[in-house]
Amino acid sequence: MKKIIIDPVTRIEGHAKITIDIDADNRVSDAKIHVTQFRGFEKFCEGQIYSQMPALTARTCGICPVSHAISSIKACDTLLGVTPPQAGINLRKIINLAQILQSHTLSFYHLSSPDFIYGFDAKKEERNIFKMMQTHPQMAKDGIMLRAFGQKIIQTLAGKRIHPDGLVPGGVEKNLDEATRDTLLAEIPNAIRISQESLAFFKTNLTKFQKEIDSFGVFPSLFMALVDEHDNLEHYDGKLKIIDSEGNVLQEHISPEEYKEFIGEAVEEESYLKSPYYKPMGYPQGMYRVGPLARLNVAKACGTARADNELLAFKALNAGKPVLNSFYYHYARLIEMLYAIEKIEALLKDEATLGEALHRTSKILKTRAVGCSEAPRGTLFHDYEVDKNGIIQKVNLIIATGNNNLAMNAGVKQVAQTFVNAEDVTEGALNRVEALIRCFDPCLSCSTHALGIVSSNIELRDHNKNIIQIFKRN
């Protein structure tokens, strides 16, 4: 048996490799993604005071720190038994949507667009944002501007663009004044323009990638997401809903506090990434997907005019049934970008957002709480257990990328079997295997908490850099 190794996987956040197994007949028998970095946040959060958790867990990731802070403060709210004032809730929602916007923009423009512009078989030296700046300067500029707008909102309302400190248990720290609101509103029209042009570009170019569309992670799976009381798209609050590949509802109106009744967590060797699954179907049959594709499959509507028009076209891709092609994560991501801008505009115009009351305080009333929100990459759980003084005793984190782990592995295998010819391995074929991972836009550094066993070599060298001994860990 032969093995092809892609190490590292490029244009993703974090560190991973892909192994492709070739059998005696020169066919791909299996392929897997191995997440090779380890963080351990669940353990070193123990012993911390609960009020430090939003700032501490925001450091889990530099790409989606707001998402961790949001889920964390929601868990802290429950520990305290408080509901933030409406102004605090609205500002939290705006900050979270700005996180969705800036992260989706990074994924589409900086990480994936080079494939759509130059093709999956283009030279690797050309598949990057720097080449885009030369050949498509306006598109590259628009991507930078749109991401900057999202980050500006976060910095303005939450204190800092990365690892914001203005999100606190019970609410937020800083109010929004009319002048600042009007400054942000003035940038909305240009943000909507960029978002709509991005959608038009993507849809216009779809005909070029039909083979990829047909084989990039196309398989039956479950889908999970938060929805509001009307079954509309929801990122900040709501209840969990799980559907199957035909659109049948398996579970709905699930409180995030009850997630352990439905979600199990498996650990596989060779990866530090957990493999969550839907308990009633067992492991690994209970594979489900989260994130933009899942959210649009689960929701009946977005709740904003422009995004709802786009959602109608999206759902028509599979005659109203769930869209199973993971390639369309990009499509769903672009619709969510448009939705986020529209929703931010509506919340900024809500007079309640300008309220003076921003947060409420209390003492510890509960010793366990779960905070759940929709991060850019999918459903995110923060589960805390504390003592009567609010000292963290136990933490369980289920990160969005972890929820997609089984689906990513299934997709990698499918793409490898479709495109990789063991007798003539091309750069374009390997790029397609990597591109499947980019569909999910994994955030690996914040999702690696499992106690996996990852093979590694440690070299002991002398002062002349000669190898004295090699230690192998397997």
Image (cartoon, rainbow, N blue to C red):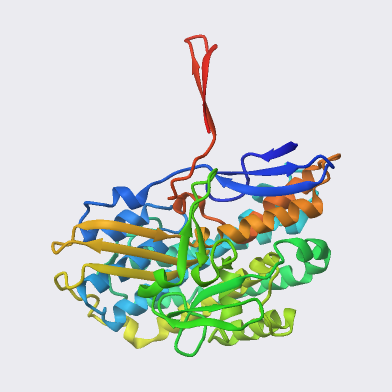
Residue at the farthest bottom position: 230
In the image, what residue occupies the spot 53% across and 87% down? 303
Residue 225 at x, y percent in the picture: 51, 75
Which of the pair 336/274 is nearer the observer? 274
Give the number of callouts: 0
The answer to whether 394 is drawn above or below residue 38 in the figure is: below
Tell me the quadrant of the picture where the N terminus can be found: top right
Q: In which image quadrant can residue 357 be found?
A: bottom left
Which of the pair 187/224 is nearer the observer? 224
In the image, what residue occupies the spot 51% across and 87% down? 231
Whether residue 347 is visible: yes
For residue 212, side relative to residue 293 (left or right): right
Residue 438 at x, y percent in the picture: 63, 56
Q: In which image quadrant can residue 144 be found?
A: bottom right
The answer to whether 121 is drawn above or below residue 207 in the figure is: above
In the image, what residue occupies the spot 75% across and 51% down? 416
For residue 192, side relative to residue 176 (left or right): right
For residue 208, side relative to residue 178 (left or right): right
Residue 3 at x, y percent in the picture: 72, 38
Whether residue 133 is visible: no
Which of the pair 260/181 is nearer the observer? 260
Residue 86 at x, y percent in the picture: 30, 83
